[in-house]
Amino acid sequence: MRTLHDAGIVTRHPIEVIDWTNEEGARFAPAMVASGVFAGVFSLDYALGQKDRDGVTLGEALERSGFAGSEEPGAHPLAAHFELHIEQGPVLENEGLEVGVVSGVQGIRWYDVMVKGQTCHAGTTPMALRRDALHAAARLAIAIDDIGWSDPGRSLSTIGLFQAYPGSRNTAPGEVRLTVDLRHPEVDGLNRMEAMLQKALGAVELDCGVDIEETKVWSSPPVEFDAGVLAAISAATQRLGYSHRTMLSGAGHDSVYTARVAPTGMIFIPCEGGLSHNVAENITPAEAERGANVLLQAVLDYDRSAG
Amino acid sequence: MRTLHDAGIVTRHPIEVIDWTNEEGARFAPAMVASGVFAGVFSLDYALGQKDRDGVTLGEALERSGFAGSEEPGAHPLAAHFELHIEQGPVLENEGLEVGVVSGVQGIRWYDVMVKGQTCHAGTTPMALRRDALHAAARLAIAIDDIGWSDPGRSLSTIGLFQAYPGSRNTAPGEVRLTVDLRHPEVDGLNRMEAMLQKALGAVELDCGVDIEETKVWSSPPVEFDAGVLAAISAATQRLGYSHRTMLSGAGHDSVYTARVAPTGMIFIPCEGGLSHNVAENITPAEAERGANVLLQAVLDYDRSAG
């Protein structure tokens, strides 16, 4: 934005910078809830009513932080939405490329799973009489990992949260709560993975004598970005002379939702070791500069060509 | 004690009721710390300095609760120590017996285990490039369960605490902390189980590309109780006409430590479904009465016969 001002450039469309609230969904599930409300995927009441683990709602947290705005979400139309992001994966770095032109985002499904066995004394309960929720959940974790390997290079599975209750050293856990994150570029792949998950839940219930409750908490279908926006990004990248490739995004982004209400596309730059969601996440100033240059040129191209 | 007073019985030895502090060790590890200090197994400073997960020491908690006494621990000799307890297991109930004469306690070893992998993004990190601490810990949990089955009817293994960090839905955990509880009636058995644990830790490290730190936090050797005390308990049980058997205790008890400084024995009564460390733990008034009768008669017998 400073560069546009410094260079005295006047665009045909107003240019805005958006910082979407709660993109990760780490404190308030689901993820990308603000862009989701903007795009009409979630109602405002639903979003503001989501609670963190301490029972605080997103609405309360926004009020407290001073970020609760007054504009009606979605009332403000976008001619296009461009998003610049680190790849959060190792592909660009491994291939020695400077820029990724992101053609779409893989689908994501989130599940909450509760494994219920029977709490019992570690020293007095014969192994054969136990219904150990931790042992059952460990077997489930192995099966869920296998789902991630079922379609190599495309399927991904992750257990992010996993906790055993009541959590006493000399007590076999009677309950384990865990989350499952399944990803695949195609709906058919997601359906196949979901079927594998259901089969694993049933098998562990039967083998370990536990009860399992499973809730699908979020489903984000695979997304294809706008051809016109992608053409602007590709043209800018080529004109700037950066090495690049077209690729899918593995992570969810606000662009998944803006794609429903506006032409959308994304730009990736490499990140060190492909690491993200890790304190070691890192990029260089040169990588940041290349990303910013592509974003600037692509937005200007699109502004000139779009109706 | 009321019955002794009501019946006007004067014993040769003073009879005392002891409520040992922190027997479970659930908030302050290790377990049985007060009887351990009494028996000279732990120093008083060590015990009072043990911290809970919030950093509060046992000494501070005792001061706050008003239970910090002034007597020098262990200075007060015991002619004998009798302990009445629920079995916390299913043996007496399954065999339809009313009383267990407890001849000893199996050995217990406790370990803290930390599995360190690499935190990474659930949507962008190929399965093959992950060092997922949760997946590694799940494999470890399966191997630790196997240790419990290695000597059927004698070996027991339990993972009581198991938590994954950082604990975000779309992040593969970089760290898992878990506890291991191994039990066996014989030192050789414990050694064999510990060797299996070490082997499992090494195998998971190698296969999953994680680092594992393991600390043995407690070791309680198998204990044999005093023949004279057990004879008094057996005689009382027979005189009262209760069905009974001799058995080992699976759980640790304060008697494990008092046995080092005084003739010691234990009495078991059945508990519903063998359940303990569970909100459903239950006994009947009739079972409690039988246990109290055995305790009373055994103590009176021993009082009369002991020097």
Image (tube, coloured by chain):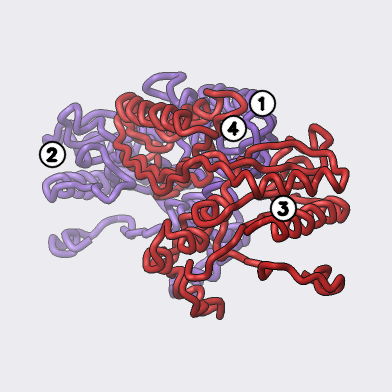
Chain colours: A red, B purple
Using the image, tell me which numbered label, if any, was put on residue B136: 4
Q: Residue at x 28, y 29 (%)?
A: B246
Label 4: how many Cα within 10 Å (few below 14, some 14–19, many 20+): many
Alpha carbons under labels 2 and 3: distance apart: 68 Å
Name which quarter of the figure residue A94 lies in. top right
**Label 1 CA crowd tier, 10 Å (few <14, some 14–19, many 20+):** some
Query: Helix or strand or loop: what does disc 1 sit on?
Result: helix
Does residue B1 appear to the left or right of B43 in the view shown? Answer: left
Q: Earlier in the sequence, mark 2 or mark 1?
A: 1
Specify the subunit that label 3 lies on: A
C-alpha gap between disc 4 and disc 3: 21 Å
Is disc 1 on the same chain as disc 2? yes
- Residue A203 in picture, x, y percent from top left: 35, 25
Let me know if marks 2 and 4 both belong to one chain.
yes
Residue indicated by mark 1 = B202
- Mark 2 vs mark 3: same chain? no
Mark 3 residue crowding within 10 angstroms, few (<14) / some (14–19) / many (20+): few
- Of labels 4 and 1, earlier in sequence is 4
The chain containing the residue under callout 4 comes to B
Tell me the amino acid under the disc marked 2: Leu
